[in-house]
Amino acid sequence: MTKFVIDPFGAEPRFDWERYRKVVAIFTRMLDNVVEIAGLPLPQQQREIEAKRRHGMGFLGLGSTLTMLKIPYGSKQSLVFTDEVSRHLAIEGWKQALELSQEKGMAPVLEQEHTITPKMLRERPQLAKDGYEVGDQVPGRILHARYSQYMAQVAELEPELVAQLAEHGARFTHHSSIAPTGTISLSMGNNASNGIEPSFSHRYFRNIIQSGKKTKEQVEVVSFELAAYRHFIAADAVDSDLPDYFVTADAISPEQHVAVQAAAQHWVDSAISKTVNVPTEFPL
């Protein structure tokens, strides 16, 4: 997400929401295409993904992005941003789900008729209020759009979108998930913070063996945000020179860690990988 920060560390850094939404739209279409070429090892797995066409779009670099926006991770302002960035991802994703459904057809499981069970009536009382009884047949697209607690949240902001999803169906049943992205963040993200996490350290040293040498060499490793700070603000900056909004995982309370996840989870319809750092003597 760091690529969407305009004027990082400046007087008024901001996030490019328009460009972000465009990328989410393109990314959603790409992930939908992956279903046909997923190459899952078991036939049962392939049938499952083809029936639901679910995928899990997420992001990496939340911690680095917040720092570049001069927002401390775990602060109230960071919760507002996390909610907003997750909300835009969700809403744009479901807009694409509708467009793709009209272009290519809805997920097969949403075309099927599903039988109302006693458990469904217990867990979704609104079904009974709407006149459904045990044994009734209901299209999957109706159950998904009108009786999913998650889609009810989407409907609060985009009622017409969800109404259209109930009528035409969605291309997929699930859209979002935030993975750990540890290796990706290091190898392809220039050591940006992974997934939803803050950076665990902004500057440290690694002992590595260079090609053609037999002895280890100590190499400085810096976080993406520190590298950016050196580029834009102070070329020789070290830990002691950094502003207060440069926070690390061990300086954030468990409550703050959970609050950030909760802000994102409101809009993420699958799992979020989250690490909560606590000291060794943390009371149980």
Image (spheres, rainbow, N blue to C red):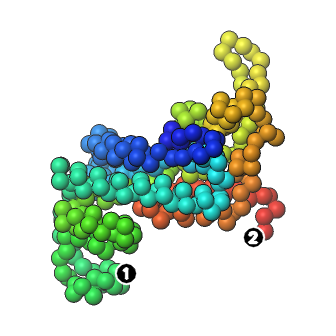
Instruction: State how many labels appear.
Output: 2
The quarter of the rendered structure image containing the C terminus is bottom right
Q: Amino acid at mark 1?
A: Glu
Is 119 on the left-hand or right-hand side of 222?
left
Residue nearest the viewer, comparing 163 with 4: 4
Q: Is residue 251 visible?
A: yes
Marks 1 and 2 in Cβ contact (< 8 Å): no
Q: Name the N-terminal-most of marks 1 and 2.
A: 1
Q: Quadrant of residue 257?
A: bottom right
Mark 1, other Cα within 10 Å: few <14 / some 14–19 / many ≥20: few
* Residue at 55% in and 61% down: 80
Is 112 on the left-hand or right-hand side of 4?
left
* Residue at 44% in and 48% down: 17
- Outermost residue to the front: 11
Image x and y of residue 262, in percent: 55, 65
SS at mark 2 in the image:
loop
Q: Which residue is mark 1?
A: 123
166 above or below 59? Answer: below
SS at mark 1 in the image:
helix
Q: Quadrant of residue 41?
A: top left
Image x and y of residue 25, in percent: 34, 46
Image x and y of residue 115, in percent: 22, 76
Q: Quadrant of residue 87?
A: bottom left
Q: Which mark is residue 284?
A: 2
